[in-house]
Image (cartoon, helix red, strand yellow):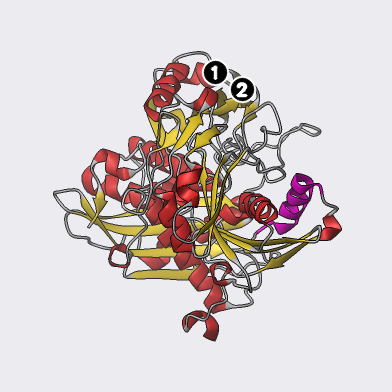
Amino acid sequence: MKEIVTGKPIFGIDVTMPGMLYAVFQRTPVMGGKAVSANLEVIKAMKGVKHAFIVEGRPLPNNYPNYLFEDAGFESGVAIVADSWWAAQSAREKLEVKWDFGKWGTQDSAENAKKAQELSQQPPARTLRQDGDVETVFKREDIKVVEGNYVFPFIAHGTMEPQNCTAHFKDGKLEIWMAGQIPQTGRTMVARLLNLPEKDVTVHIVRGGGGFGRRAYNDLMLDAAWISKQVGAPVKLVWSREDDIQHDYYRCGGFQYLKGAVDKDGKLIAWHDHFVGYGEGNAFAHDGGFNANEFPARFVPNYRVQSSVMPLGLKTGALRAPYSNSTAWVIQSFIDELAHAAGKDPLQFRLDMLATTPLVEAAGNNRMPPGLNPARMSGVLKLVAEKSGWGNRQLPKGTALGVAFHFSHRGYFAEVAEVSVAANKKIKVNKVWVAGDIGSHIINPSSAETQVQGSVIDGLGEMRQEITLKNGSVVQSNYHDHPMLRMSEAPPQIEVHFLKTNNPPTGLGEPALPPILPAVCNAIFTATGERIRTMPMTKQGFSFA
């Protein structure tokens, strides 16, 4: 702790050794693209530059163009190696590359959105889950039907420490220094790439300045190892912020077309979701699918989730609270819509749903076993209602409370956000209350509290982040157009409460994040009457004060 707060050099970017060179790598800006030629002689003549060469890359390992933990792919590009990182990066500014962008060179986010809208009007490609008969319910005249179309974007991890890796290939053996979340798969990948026995590859794990899923992918290990072998010296490969934003394994975007029905008593009786995502055939893009067994599955008698997919030429992957970070926003926002349509208090509406006797899964089916325990979720909902004074506080005009919950990564969390919205749509999150159930024992209470507070801040930042494609390339490049939450925009107080229960303890890095986005959006609706159905919220004119 002392080393961290006093800025000691203990992170991956601090690694150094005798004779070490520094590398930058201009990757293909379009997935699957290939460097055809470059002005290498001009680059080699620049001050401090030792080497410059084209990296051919390696064909993608399978038919579907996506990258998995087990095989990150090895992309084509141009490597520049110099006696300082600044020299390598300065030379890169003069680099001219002729690219063959291949099949994904025309991919465009606006066209993908248009295609999703077309697919939503067509019969879904497949049904992921079906209980009861939603179509019969929707034809009834004694019900109220609500429809809402939700859009969530690709987003980047934006770790504070850019990606980096140091490699030293010598005498047929390789050593690597890197901050990795799943380093053992990287070791296997590097050994395969360089045709080495795994026993001849040694990986030294160093601290990383943020991971959130990004450092689970070991693509930099491949690049650094290849470059080191080519130049015959230890090499530290460091990405610029632009590299980091434009060559991520992005949280996958998607589109959800929802329809629900409440009866005259205000009870939710039907739910339909047509999820339009990315993939091919029956395969979703990596971490871009949808779990049809998520709540409210089993708690609505007539429930159907269907799906269609469209191709994607972009690397996607896990981002803190994978799947859940987008799913919770969609589901809990639409539940809020249904609660208002039913004329019910949004928190009580959720408690009523949880009090419904859940459907029992048929024995021997191939669905995921039911996860959410309604008693545990009701417990945290009641706790957060008590701590936030839900229903018992008078708030000024333009200020409102919003509530949401989500079960994910074995954690039960409910959150209430107090949000003020000015006439110009500038929002201020005044306070957040969090109630969580992660079992019977918390070893480090201070760390647990800060994990939750960090999750809330992380989730708020996602409300204005977006990655878009134009001509196959990522448009955004740095924090000016993929912003992180500023200190001045964070809630002044995030109040954390844990409900100790007689259950085995579970983890905490993921499950506190998902509910914050819908809680804030639901508060905005209550304060303004405007429902946010498209992220980032700036698309509907909202921004942090």
**Nearest the eye: 37 or 293:** 37
With 396 as the anchor, is 55 left or right in this view?
right
Q: Which mark is residue 127?
A: 2
Q: Quadrant of the C terminus?
A: bottom left
Please report contact status of discs 1 and 2: CB closer than 8 Å, yes or no.
yes
**Nearest the eye: 389 or 213:** 213
Residue 189 part of the magenta-drawn span:
yes
In the figure, 323 relative to 51: above or below?
above
In the figure, 252 relative to 211: above or below?
above
What is the number of callouts on the image? 2
**Nearest the eye: 448 or 93:** 93
Cα–Cα gap, marks 1 and 2:
7 Å
Q: Which amino acid does the dot numbered 1 rest on?
A: Pro
Q: At 54% across and 83% down in the image, what residue appears?
A: 3
Residue 203 percent across, percent down from the top left: 73, 63
With 445 as the anchor, is 476 left or right in this view?
left
Mark 1 neighbour density, 10 Å: few (under 14) some (14–19) many (20 or more): some
* Residue 14 visible (yes or no): yes
Residue 488 percent across, percent down from the top left: 28, 66
Q: At 61% across and 24% down in the image, what residue appears?
A: 280
Element type where label 2 sits in the image: strand
Q: Could you say which quadrant of the image residue 336 lies in?
A: top left
Provide the residue designation for mark 1: 124
In the figure, 522 relative to 108: above or below?
below
Q: Which residues are magenta?
A: 181-195
Residue 303 percent across, percent down from the top left: 56, 29
Q: Main secondary structure of the magenta part?
A: helix
Q: Quadrant of the N terminus?
A: bottom right
Mark 2 neighbour density, 10 Å: few (under 14) some (14–19) many (20 or more): few
